[in-house]
Image: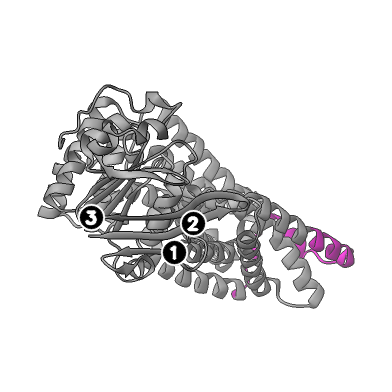
Amino acid sequence: MEINVSGVSCRIGEVEILKDINFRLESGSFTAIVGPNGAGKSTLVKIMLGLLKPDGTAAKILYDGVEVAEVNKNRHWLGYVPQNYAFDRSVPITLDEFFKITCRAEEGDKYNSVLESLKLFKLKKHIMGGLSGGEIQRALIAYNLFHDKRVLFLDEPTSAIDIEGETLVYSILNNLNKERKINIIIISHDIDAVLKNVDTVVCLNKTIHCMGGACEILEGSMIQKFFEGHRGLYQHGGCHHGRC
Amino acid sequence: MLEILLMPFALKALFVSALISVICAWSGIFVTIKNMAFFSESISHSSLAGIAIALWLGFDPSLFLVFFSAAAAALIALVAQSSIASRDSVIGIVHATIMSAGIILLGFLRGGNTDIARYLFGDVLAVTSTDLYICSALFVLAAAYLAKFSTTHTLTCLTPELARLNGINVKKYDFMLMILLALIISVSVKIAGAILVTALLVIPSNAAKNISASYNSFVILSIVTGLTGAVAGVAASIFLDFPTGPSIVLLNSIAYFASLFARNYLKISI
């Protein structure tokens, strides 16, 4: 699904959050939006999801040429996995019940195959409050898959999980991107992990500083300038990008 | 001795308590998930102002209270939507405003009317036929609403962000829940009294939460706890001549502490 973002600006009170954002993402792309804290990444994603309105009337968010408001009205195929899934862990709800209540998912081949693919099948009778951060992340990805989402946004998908969990989440996302042709858009601070997996990088700090292929961005001088003072964020050592 | 429970006044009290406790325990699930205890407390306390206005105007307090509580909930929702203050602050402000007006009105009524005390502490043994009809109508309405929309409310209470993304109007459902709770509270005041009515919403669901191993158990145990507390409370009140509302609440509290013990020391989960 081709995504076009044009003329997006956003102010909250006197504070400018985003200024004239314009970019286009190819159909089936795996994109990372990177930038320091306060760069406007989460705001941009919320605007792209139609959860937040940008300033003015010139802003346009188009999915295959259709406005986001129209997309949300008719077909809810924009998926979202929030950074900190705020839910009361003391609520006694099993994973199985969560999917059946929230997605009206029905037991069957598709249900079982989604759970199997996300390594959640054995956990389906477990209380959600007892699941680890990585398991919750995978459950939220599954939640979106039951709804047949075609674009999936993830805000810091690996921030609360260990290396093993991170590898699993990225391998699941890569599969969804390649096999189901789902556009994946992630927000991340971990440039090293991101560059190993994504094909497009958008460097954002209120406005777009640079954008392009992962290798092009990593090897160019733009990202060094962009992350000046934040070198630890990306210097885990060289380019490990699988697609370079 | 048991024949006393078959007398019309006792049957009426048992019937009304059972209806109210079931609906309170069921909707109390959402009060617990969404942390709406303060909202419930405010509506129940504000009902005293509603009773004062009804008595002052010469209306039947039971019926007037239904409309008054719904209006108070709508006022809280509207002010919360147009204010930058947190929801709890808005509830506190609206609650204080209504209560102050109610206290001033109560001053005018001083010296005669005992209805206020009945609403303050509850008196299910004195339910009238009107109360019975109002309770039954509310039960049918609320049960039908919860049966149809409890799944949507579970989603909007548990995870509003995801609900919004699925095209659900979360604000509308939050508003509907507030109105539903206000209606339930307005009728329940007659049983437990304005001071204790929140207990019927909060205690059974929290007792159930302590020992539930699934959402289904959570809902069923909450209703069973509420219903048992109500029936046993009315019976205890008749046999032991205790005030009914506090008896029901006290039995619910015992269930809560027993479930807490069962969870922490016996590791029971159902």
Mark 3 surroundings: few (<14), some (14-19) or many (≥20) residues within 10 A: some
Q: Is residue A223 above or below residue B160?
A: above
Query: Is residue B123 found left or right of A212 in the rendered image?
Result: right
Name the chain under label 1.
A
Q: Which numbered disc, 2 or 3, marks the residue that appears first in the sequence? A: 2
Q: Is residue B267 above or below residue B165?
A: above
Q: Is residue B257 above or below residue A45?
A: above
The x and y percentages for residue B20 are 52, 61
Determine which residue is flagged by label 1: A59
Mark 1 surroundings: few (<14), some (14-19) or many (≥20) residues within 10 A: some
Determine which residue is flagged by label 3: A26
Looking at the rendering, the stretch of residues picked out in magenta corresponds to B100-129
The x and y percentages for residue A39 are 47, 42
Number of callouts in the render? Answer: 3
Tag of residue A9: 2
Whether the residues at callouts 3 and 1 have beta carbons within 8 Å, the answer is: no
**What main secondary structure does the magenta stretch of the protein show?**
helix
Quarter in which the N terminus of chain A is drawn: bottom left
On whether residue A191 falls in the magenta region, the answer is no
Residue plotted at (82% across, 59% down)? B103
Whether the residues at callouts 2 and 1 have beta carbons within 8 Å, the answer is: yes
| Mark 3 residue element | loop
Query: Is residue A7 found left or right of A183 in the rendered image?
Result: right
**Looking at numbered disc 1 in the image, what kind of residue is underneath it?**
Ala
Instruction: Answer yes or no: is residue A108 visible.
Output: no
